[in-house]
Amino acid sequence: YHAGTYGCNWVLYYLLHRAARDEQPERVGFVHIPPLPSQAIQKRLATLPTMGLATSIQAIRLIITHLD
């Protein structure tokens, strides 16, 4: 349940690269949503930062409202 620094960075920089080479580039970004508490429990990773489903949904909706 962890994309890791390498995976997250790769996705962001790949999207930025694609946008930079397009004639009409789109704005891009990457949002890392923490795993659910149940996922951390399943993996026995008690110290893993988590976020509840309702909070994750609220955060995603808030992000979407700020996009043009």
Image: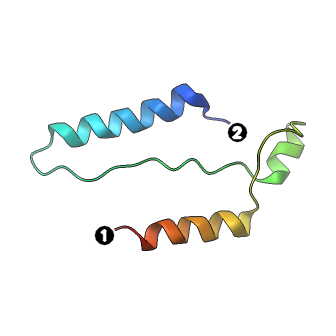
- Badge 1 amino acid: Asp
Q: Position of residue 49 (x, y in %)?
A: 77, 45
| Pointer 2 local density, CA inside 10 Å: few below 14, some 14–19, many at least 20 | few
> Image check: 25 left or right of 38?
left
Residue 47: image tag? none
- Give whichever of 39, 59 is nearer the camera: 59
- Up-down relation of residue 7 to residue 54 (above or below): above
Q: Residue under label 2, please give it.
A: 1
- Up-down relation of residue 43 to residue 26 (above or below): above
What residue lies at 53% left-to-right and 71% top-to-bottom?
61
Give the mark, 1 or 2, whose residue is nearer the N terminus: 2
The image quarter in which residue 66 lies = bottom left
- Up-down relation of residue 30 to residue 12 (above or below): below
- Badge 2 amino acid: Tyr
What residue lies at 70% left-to-right and 67% top-to-bottom?
55
SS under mark 2: loop
What residue lies at 44% left-to-right and 30% top-to-bottom?
10
C-alpha span from label 1 to label 2 = 30 Å
- In this figure, what is the number of numbered marks? 2
Q: Position of residue 67 (x, y in %)?
A: 37, 67
Q: Residue under label 1, please give it.
A: 68
SS under mark 1: loop
What residue lies at 43% left-to-right and 36% top-to-bottom?
11
